[in-house]
Each structure stands twice: as structure tokens, then as C-alpha cells.
Image (spheres, grey):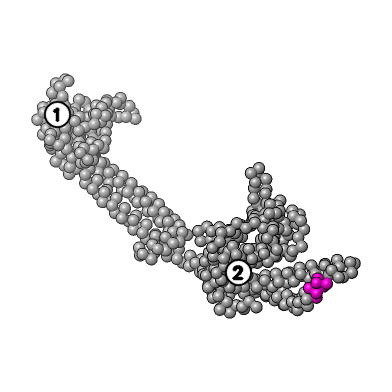
Amino acid sequence: MSKGILTRLRLSSLRLRLVVVFALVALTAAVSASGIAYWLNREAVLTRTQDGALGDFRQEMQNRAATLPVRPSQEDLRRTAEQMATGSANYQVLLLGERDAGKPIVGASDPDDFTLADVPRSLQEAVDTRRPVTEANPYPYHLFWQRTERNGTPYLVGGTRIDGGGPAGYMFKSLAAEKADLNSLAWSLGIATALAVAGSVLLAQVAATTVLRPVHRLGEAAKQLGEGKLDTRLRVTGADELADLTRTFNSAAESLQKKVADMSAREESSRRFVADMSHELRTPLTALTAVTEVLEDEQDSLDPMIAPAVALVVSETRRLNDLVENLMEVTRFDAGTARLVLDEVDIADQITACIDARAWLDAVELDAERGIVAPLDPRRLDVILANLIGNALKHGGSPVRVSVRTEDDELVIAVRDHGPGIPEEVLPHVFDRFYKASASRPRSDGSGLGLSIAMENALIHGGSITASNSVGEDGAVDGAVFVLRLPLDASGITREVQTRSSQGEVEEA
């Protein structure tokens, strides 16, 4: 069996199972056939040998031993035994008579090769037993035989007695030749069985290859579909079940390609609509922002009846402006055009600047060592921190604590508040777009995009954000904890993003 076949057997469990099944079936059939053939041949060989030897011995007992006198001498017994053993059956003979009553004498054709000790006691008792003569049993004595073994060589031992007080005779025939023939037959059948199993393995390999080649092609095609090659199709050959499976695959692939194309078109249309809408809103928002800034500056001098309306306009204009910026940021992430612009950032200084710019110094506690520097995108890190800290201030309880540490090759920033925490059913959705847990926390005036944008900015750095609840010593929830993890070296992420951008993606405006 070639190395390639063995490799394929190791790599394909289905192929291996087919080969094993074929081999087991062939082995079972070959062993059964060989066993039956061996058993039949063994019985035939042994039966033929023992029938011939016993028949010849019976005839010799009738022709020679029956002519001996009632009280034969030992010489008579020996001479007769030698005459009986000279036949073509090739066995040794032992005759047992009586010189006087109760005084047995033995005559053997070869005393060195066959003695009375070689005759099993059970056989002697059967030979000496006189049976009553009836219609069903016309003879008082019968011929008995038994197979025995001496020094590893099988022998056939037979015996009978002459009626009327004649001697008892025993024959002793070696079955070594028959054993050698049967051993040769066993070896031949074993070799035939091994060849049958080897042939079945080769046939199984051929059959498995024939059956599994289309399955392998289907697997490769499915893999290509999974990699995004939706135009993958297979050539249909034949009219069997595998051909029907191939046609079904092609039909499914065509339907999938059409649906994905339709979904991509709708998604691209929706993304373009959001981007265009956001860009179109920028111009009027710029004008509105300028007007609201003027109104805000003049708010103290306005009529008290008008001042609340002006404050509402200013607040909602800023909220609308934030929403448009967030929508544009989400559109960049969806389009894959968001890029990192890395710079060496002192983490403590960056967090302090973020808090100071938003006038949160009095509400935020910072626990960060000086000197922790990492190559990050300052603007995106500021967006992440602003969303996490702002979310803690809006929905949690003061004070909000921000702690910074390093673990292995990661920068870990934890933002913890002391509010009511996040309900368990809300935790899996806190980073979903436009998700607001209004039932568990005070109603937010945000868009529901802040945490999702923070997560996107963490992911583009190769990091992540997790949300959980802090449990106090009494077992009660004591605020929510958001943990930001960023790699201390994001240069590899930047190279990957720049490579994708150079392959035809639109750069961020």
C-alpha cells in the first residue's frame, strides 16, 4: 500500500470507515470460508485415514488373531502381531491373551514403539466390556477407537476382542502425515485469507475514491462559498444521487448569490443614504450651530418668556449635531473606511485631557501611573473614554473611578460608577446600536450609539470592551464596571488597515 493511500486514510475518517468496513466484511467472509474448508478437509482426511486403518485392523483380527489357540504363547502373539503390522495401513499391533486364567501375556509388533501403557484406560475398559447379544446387538464385542497424542504427535488407537475367549487386539497408528497435510492446508488458507483482505482493502480504496471524490468536490465548493466566492459552481455528471446533490448545491449557491447580492445592494444603498443624509445635514447644522451660539451668548438679555425656548433650541441643536457626527462615524465603520492614526500617547495625560475638556474633574477619580505610553489613535481613544465616562456619569452614581493598569501586552482601563448597576437582561445588549435600557435607568437624552461607537473604536485597535456589575461586600450590586482592553502595540493593526485601504477602499473624509 502506497504512502499516499495511507495519508488519505489518515486524513479522511469517512474513507477510513469505508476501508475498515470492507476489510472486516472480507475478513469475516474469508475466515468463515477458510474455517469451513479446513474443518471439512480435516474431517475428510482423518475419517478416510481412520476408516481405512480400522477396517484393515478389523479384517486382520478376523483373519489372523481369530486363528490363534485359546491359550496362545507369547511367541504366537508376537508373531501374529508382526504379521498384522506388515500391511499397507502402517500401524503397530499389540495382542493381549492369557497363558492361564488370570495370567495375561502380551505380544507386540514393536515393543519399543507401542506398549499397553500407550492404550488409554477408558479404551481398554470399553474393549473388555462384554455386551449382551440381542437382535439389535448381534456381537458381544465391538471395535472402539480413540485419538490421542504422544510427545506432540497425534495417534489413532483402536481395539477389539475376539469372541469366544480369543485375544484382545490394539492398533496404534501415527497421524503425523495427516497433521502435516492439515498444517499445510491451514497455511494455504491463511495466505488466501490475507490476500483476500488485502484485495478488499484495495477495492475499498478504489470504491471510496469513486464515491468520495464528488463529496470532496462538494466540500471544497462549500468551503469556497464560505470564503465569499459565491460564483462557485460544480459540473454535474451522471444521474445518480450524487448528481442530484450536486444540482441541489448549484441551485442553493445560485440562490445564495442572488440573495447576498440583493442584501449587499440594499445595505450599500442604506449606507450611502445615511452618509449622504449626514453630509447634507452638516451644512444647515453648521448654520444652526452658529445661530445657537449667538443666541446662547445673548440668552441672559432675552425676554424671560423666550429664554427657555432658546435654551431648548441650543440643547437640541447640539444633540442633533452629535447624532449626525455619530451617524457619520457609524457609516465609516460599516463601509470599512475607518482608519487608525497612531501616535505615542501618555495614557494618564490623555484621560486627564478628556475629563478636563468636558469639565468632569470634580466628578471623576483617576488612578493612573504616569509614564504608561502606548501607540494609539488619540482621537479614537478620546471617543472611547468620553463615551464610557459620560455613560457612567449619566446613568451611574458619583464618584466615577477610572483606573489604569497593564497586563502582559495589554493596556487595561476600568471605568466604574456607584449607581444601581446594569440589569442582567440588559448586559448582553449594552453595546447594541440605538439600545436604551430606559426601564432600568433614568431616561437618556442620547442617541443610543455612544457605547456601540466606543466598541467599534476599541475593535479597530484590536481591543475590546466588557461590561459587568460590581458586587459589594454585602453581596449587593454596587455600580457598573466597563473594562477597556487595548494592545500596547497596535502597529500591526495599523499596517493591516492601511493594506486594506490601499486595495481600493475609500479613505475617511
User: What numbered label is drawn on residue 19?
Assistant: none
Q: Position of residue 257 (x, y in %)?
A: 62, 73
Q: Which residue appears at 78% of the width and 76% of the height?
A: 290
The span shown in magenta is 291-298
User: What numbered label is drawn on residue 378?
Assistant: 2
Magenta-colored stretch includes residue 356: no
Tell me, yes or no, if residue 430 can be seen here. Answer: no
483 and 449: which is toward the camera: 483
493 and 62: which is toward the camera: 493
Q: Classify the position of the N terminus by image quarter.
A: bottom left
Which amino acid type corresponds to the residue marked 1 in the rendered image? Val
Q: Is residue 60 left or right of residue 41?
A: left
Q: Which residue appears at 27% of the width and 26% of the height?
A: 129
Q: Classify the position of the C terminus by image quarter.
A: bottom right
Q: Position of residue 473 (x, y in %)?
A: 64, 44
Q: Which residue appears at 65% of the width and 56% of the height?
A: 365
Q: Secondary structure at mark 2?
A: helix
Q: Which residue appears at 72% of the width and 61% of the height?
A: 435
| The quarter of the displayed image where residue 137 is located | top left
User: What numbered label is drawn on residue 106?
Assistant: 1
Q: Main secondary structure of the magenta part?
A: helix
Q: Residue furthest left?
A: 75
Which marked residue is nearer to the observer: mark 1 or mark 2? 2
Q: Is residue 92 left or right of residue 505?
A: left
175 and 48: which is toward the camera: 175
